Amino acid sequence: MKFEHVCIESLAVALPEEVWSSAAIEERLRPLYERLKLPVGRLELMSGIRERRMWPTGTRPSDASAQAGRAVLAKSALGAERVELFVHAAVSRDMLEPATAAFAHRKMGLPSTAQIFDLSNACLGFLNALTVAAGLIESGQIRCALVVSGENGRPLVEQTVQTLLAKPLSRNDIKPYFANLTIGSGAVAAMVCHRSLVKGHAHRLLGGIARAATQHSELCQGDTHGADALAMQTDSEQLLIAGVGLAQATWRDFSAEQGASFDRFICHQVGSTHRRTLYETLGLDLAKDFSTFETLGNTGSVALPATLCAAVDAGAVREGHRVGLLGIGSGLNCLMLALEW
């Protein structure tokens, strides 16, 4: 896919104030650690994640999305009345029906003329939503879209801790639950529009490549667990191997279309092992990476765009930089986008 007239006009994040360190989570799991003789510190050592943030109990994904949406509207030169498409693109949803976008739309006071819907595709949802909005803008059907994602990892981590403490699990049994403990919470929003609406320098979305490897769809699966909790199990070792393999195939096609010269790469934020293996396999310079997993954990669909926003705020992504957005999510799906900031 290629885009000529699509820009990310503004980008903003919203983060919870409550911080959960990996050490604090391990302290809660002390009975499990003592029973299985697990070394304290293994969670941070294996993932590189020191801490993550959590929304207060009772926070809905639409609350988080609306908070990020209000933040991006405050930064944007475009008013809410310009929004013709509104997409909630998170894994987390308030409920099955209606769309979580409906609740966030109401909380933000967006116009009734905006088309709204949810778009969910594991950790790739936000990037997928960008391409949907970009296609509609490029074809002339709309001129401005607002994409939001609010992820609430608290119920999953809470349920995982309860499960690990309640069941007589062996060292091997706990492996599918490990990835759950790396999850964090956050929200992100982007105003996406036609170039003609931007005054001054424009951050252009150039295009990208998507690839799927659905033979690996069983490696990471999550579902509801009771009324207010979530359950997820992940074969982390096989997911890493399959995910990096898919990324390598996607990068081959992506670099052929968009070129291999980038000033900065922003990847999905899984952890240190995933990052190192990905860069080594693709033959990319690790010095061009920018990461947030150390302090935010894996925030699902929020992770990559929130990291892009952090990179911009830190001056690591500057005007004129070519940025490669390297997204991957369970399913397996991979989406790589080129951005000219």
Image: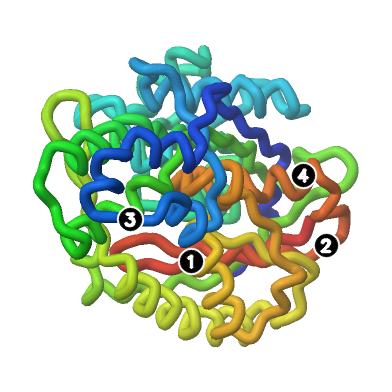
The mark found on residue 196 in the picture is 4
Please state which amino acid type lies under the numbered disc 2. His
The amino acid type, in three-letter code, at marker 4 is Ser
Q: How many marks?
A: 4
**Viewed as shown, does residue 242 lie left or right of 218?**
right
Tag 3 and tag 4, C-beta contact below 8 Å: no
Q: Which mark is residue 30?
A: none
Earlier along the polypeptide chain: callout 2 or callout 3? 3
User: Which x, y percent locates residue 132?
Assistant: 47, 52
The answer for how far apart the CA atoms under marks 3 and 1 are is 37 Å
Label whose residue precedes the other's in the sequence (2 or 1)? 2
Identity, as a three-letter code, of the amino acid under mark 1: Leu
Q: Residue at x 74, y 49 (%)?
A: 311
Residue under numbered circle 1: 335
Query: Upstream in the sequence, badge 1 or badge 4?
Result: 4
Check disc 2 and report its element: helix, strand or loop. loop
Q: Is residue 124 visible?
A: no
SS state under label 1: strand
